[in-house]
Amino acid sequence: MNTNTQTIQGVLSIAALICLLVGFFNLFSPEINGILYHHVFYVLIGASFFFQAPTFTNKNMIYPMYAAAVLCVVGAFLPQDSQFAFIKTIGLFAGVLLSIFNRPRPVRRA
């Protein structure tokens, strides 16, 4: 994995976690917390998934990770009361699962 890609993905992931924590603990006004918790978080996670996708060793999982990124970002821009607002959560879970199952396997020496 390229060092710049790792850095970008790491910064995006940490920023997303900060948005999640700020929104969860209600550190700002309800409007700002809602934007951070329901919109910015998913955009940042989607961007992180986008940068992570090309690093997968299993090439069959690259496009599903891109799809998870798109679901997160598109879902973030849908209104909260939309019947399709759940797609951002599907994208989040799919991206996390793909990340977990596409980790490089440690090499065991005999």
Image (cartoon, rainbow, N blue to C red):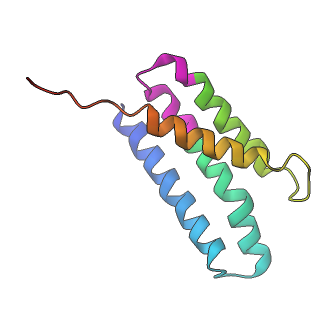
Q: Which residues are magenta?
A: 49-62
Determine the image quadrant of residue 106. top left
Q: Quadrant of the N terminus?
A: top left
Determine the image quadrant of residue 107. top left
Q: Nearer the viewer, residue 90 or 62?
A: 90
Please tell me whether residue 40 belongs to the stretch shown in magenta.
no
Q: Position of residue 29 (x, y in %)?
A: 74, 82
Residue extending furthest toward the left? 110
Q: Does 71 sit left or right of 109 as displayed?
A: right
Would you say the magenta stretch is mainly helix, strand or loop?
A: helix
Residue extending furthest toward the front? 110
The structure residue drawn at horizontal position 64% and vertical position 57%, both measured from the top left corner, is 41
Q: Nearer the viewer, residue 20 or 44?
A: 20
* Rendered position, 14 above or below 47: below
Q: Quadrant of the C terminus?
A: top left
Q: Does 44 sit left or right of 75 as displayed?
A: left
* Rendered position, 49 above or below 85: above
Q: Does 108 sit left or right of 75 as displayed?
A: left
* Rendered position, 107 above or below 83: above
Residue extending furthest toward the right? 82
The structure residue drawn at horizontal position 73% and vertical position 61%, both measured from the top left corner, is 38
Number of numbered discs overlaid on the protein picture? 0
Determine the image quadrant of residue 31. bottom right
Q: Position of residue 7 (x, y in %)?
A: 40, 46
Please tell me whether residue 53 belongs to the stretch shown in magenta.
yes
The structure residue drawn at horizontal position 85% and vertical position 50%, both measured from the top left corner, is 78
The structure residue drawn at horizontal position 53% and vertical position 39%, both measured from the top left corner, is 97
